[in-house]
Amino acid sequence: MRSARARFTFLIKGVQALTLAVAVCFSLGATDAGSRFTNLNHRLMCTCGCAEILGECNHVGCPSSGQELTELKAGIAAGKSDQEILASFAAKYGATVLAAPTGHGFDLVAWIAPFAVFAAALLGTILLIRRWGKPRGKMESAARSSDPATDALREKIRRETGDDGGI
Amino acid sequence: MAAFGSLALLIALALAAYNLLAGTVALRLLATGQPAPIQPERLADTARRAGIAGFVAVTAAAFALIWSVFTNDFSITYIMEHSNRALPAAYKFSALWSGQEGSLLLWAWLLGMYGFVLRLTHKSDVTLYAYAGTIMAGIQVFFLAVLNFAAPPFALYQGVIPDDGNGLNPLLQYPEMVIHPPMLYLGYVGFSVPFAFALGALMMRYPGEKWIKITRAWTMVTWLFLTCGIFLGMHWAYAVLGWGGYWGWDPVENASVMPWLTGTAFLHSVMMQEKKGIMKSWNVWLIFSTFLLTLLGTLLTRAGLVSSVHAFAESSIGSWFVTFMVIVLAVCIFTFILQRSHLKSEQRVESLVSRESSFLFNNLVLLMACFVILWGTLFPVLSEYVQGTKVTVGAPWYNRVAVPIGIFLLFLTGVGPLLPWRATSFRAIRRNFVLPVIVFWATVVVCLAVGVAPWKDGAFDTGNFYALVAISTAATVFTAILSEFVRGAGVIARQSGRNFLAATWLLTRRNTRRYGGYIVHIGVVIVVVGLAGSAFNRNVESELALHDKISVGPYTLECVGFTQDSNLNYNSEYALLDVYKNGKKSFQMSPEKRVYLASEQPQTMVAIHSVPAWDLYVVYEGTNPDTGQPIIKAFLNPLVGWIWFGVALMVFGTLVALIPSLKPTAQKGAHP
């Protein structure tokens, strides 16, 4: 019978093998040519006022989507890059034709702020828990109720008013 | 009836104002013990009774509006703008919330109803209920003041009264629209109750956590209503808007999901307060934020701050909401600063890897999701202010920013229950996590094998990649939750000799809140799998002559006819399509396009054939004006049915969690 350590090593190796297999699978598919048209028409908005993604606008006789799609096809056929096509749309229809903020100037804030706030909040929480986890010093002891009678009363209240706690 | 309705609203305002003033004076007298010409208890009781009478008055006003709709009283502007004679009876009820004034009246009525129930059950804790009832009266004063002075639903039509009304918005003429808005409002308004209890408990320095126990059912029921409201809205959007999706990140949709996220965080962290006496300030602010977000959502859409396909036209009530929000926030901050010593935690989180910290991180991620949605909703306004140009923050942005946070949240949902309280060891982590990790990687391999790959048309695709990670994480979380059931039920089965199913049932009955919660989590997992399916949607669009065919996935659709129909309410065009699967005729579908006579607005009626693997979703887009032939768009949307099934499971789990657990004595009796 193998030891627990050997079993764990075997498990780690298994996970590594699986990771490698998945990585190989990922790289296999990434060599085909992609459909830029579908990708790009989902990065643009229909300008008729329906507030829908260009590729999903479903109004028969929509005054805008047909023309926009034609321009998009023409841009791709002309060999323009994605950025050039998006820039030409923004120049013609205004910045609201782009379905998401660009990665330049103030628009960049839209992308960065959520992750920056998340990282800061995560770091703050980790630091807070680590601080709490340290042996309590004088100040922290003082911050907590040091009166045993109060503690006992609080515990009694909790017992009498709470239930199984649910978790 | 307009005069009766207006008078009822005025009386309701007077009663709510009395409730607020008399309640405040009585509670002040009780708190300070000052002598007064009237006993404070009696004064408080008159305030309570005024609250009950106020509900009767608001009910009378709501009845007056519904009566006016049914009697086609077009002398009332609201009725003229939102109803017509041919409108079916069920949709006449919808007229109550189809416009701004009506929906505010619905809000006030629901608030009155919640307050009515609260005031009838006041004997559980007279003083705490008096505080909560007075705070709710304050909220009611605001809504009734808006209804009386800024958005009166009974305003009379100026000029010659028309013979017929403009009709109800066609988008609202769908069965779910009779249920979805009231559900959403029940959720929105319901959060006033835990808010009132939290603020009241803080004001009176309520000892212990009984207020949480009192409000638990309120909060869960409210959360349930909001959940149902949001998902009914998704289903309505899916079935009516005809673009093949169910969530468009519209500001109104975002406004509904923000309080849901903070409410969900509150439901989790409040358990920590009950069990460990921690996160008290956090919880108070969570419920304050949830209530404020319900107001912010209303402000965003009604003040014209952000543009939305759902939003009402810009109106003057935005400034009313801003003022009210500032007052509420000031009261919250003032009370918190004054009473913060009452909110000191009795214990602390000791380890980064523990059940307590997982709750903390879960809360953090839920709040981050809320922040991301708020940020995305407000960024166009911010951009216009800073750089002078508005930008669109649409689905591509949310998919890149919100989806990873959602997947991380899902991961925490599975990890939390696997962690022990206080602290853990590496050995314990290894023991608990081996199986979920194996399941994660096995799912990745299976997904790749069946074609759920992170590339599309040969190139790496973010959506597909997220779908793969979401499905694999969902499988991991499902395994983790299931192992909790198996472990617990296994012990009971061994001890009592019951079969495994009976043991699982007893396990759930013993701690309904915990295992009900797990059922909700399983529902969430299933919803996530359904959402991940959207990465693999396919569609085909074509003009179809008679007996022309189009194919999507395993289905071939043949046009066997297109015709027209009409009734008093609308004219419709529809196509008859025979659907073949594997060469055999399986069923028929008839997607439709209506044009409502009163409003002259078109409306799509999508035909949907749903099986567990996918939905065949067919839209009649109209006719080509040159050829007169119908244009049909057919979508194959994988796993959509899983979303609705997952929601049903979430509802079931919440209902289980609402059932009281078996008492220890009953448990003894349950054993043989």
Image: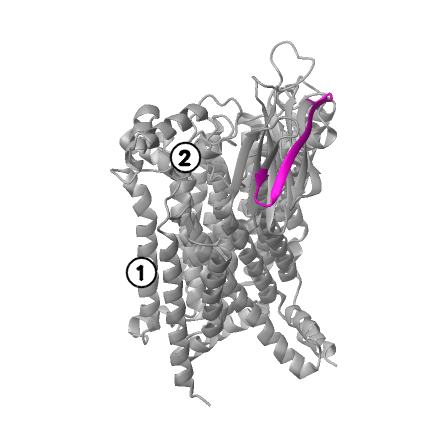
How far from the left and from the top, in percent, is residue B12? 63, 34
Q: Quadrant of residue B383?
A: top left
Q: Nearer the viewer, residue A19 or B196?
A: A19
Vertical order, B423 against A46 (above or below): below
Q: Residues within 10 Å of mark 2 (few under 14, many from 20)?
A: many
Say if the magenta span includes residue B312. no
Q: Is residue A8 left or right of residue B268?
A: left
Hey, which residue is sitting farthest bottom in the picture?
A1
Identity of the residue furthest to the front in this view: B583
Instruction: Specify whether residue B69 is in view.
Output: yes
Indicate yes or no whether the magenta region holds residue B564. Answer: yes
Query: Gap in Å between the C-alphas at discs 2 and 1?
Result: 38 Å
Give the residue type that dot 2 points to.
Answer: Asn
Instruction: Give above or below for B115 relative to B575.
Output: below
Label 1, residues with CA under 10 Å away: few <14, some 14-19, many ≥20: few
Q: Position of residue B4 (x, y in %)?
A: 69, 25
Q: Residue at x 42, y 53 (%)?
A: B454
Task: Kindly identify which residue carries mark 1.
Answer: A123
Q: At numbered mark 2, what does the secondary structure look like: helix, strand or loop?
A: helix
The stretch in magenta equals B551-570
Residue behind mark 2: A41
Q: Residue at x 43, y 76 (%)?
A: B430
Q: Are marks 2 and 1 in contact (CB under 8 Å)?
A: no
Residue B266 in the image, given as x and y percentages of width and height = 49, 56
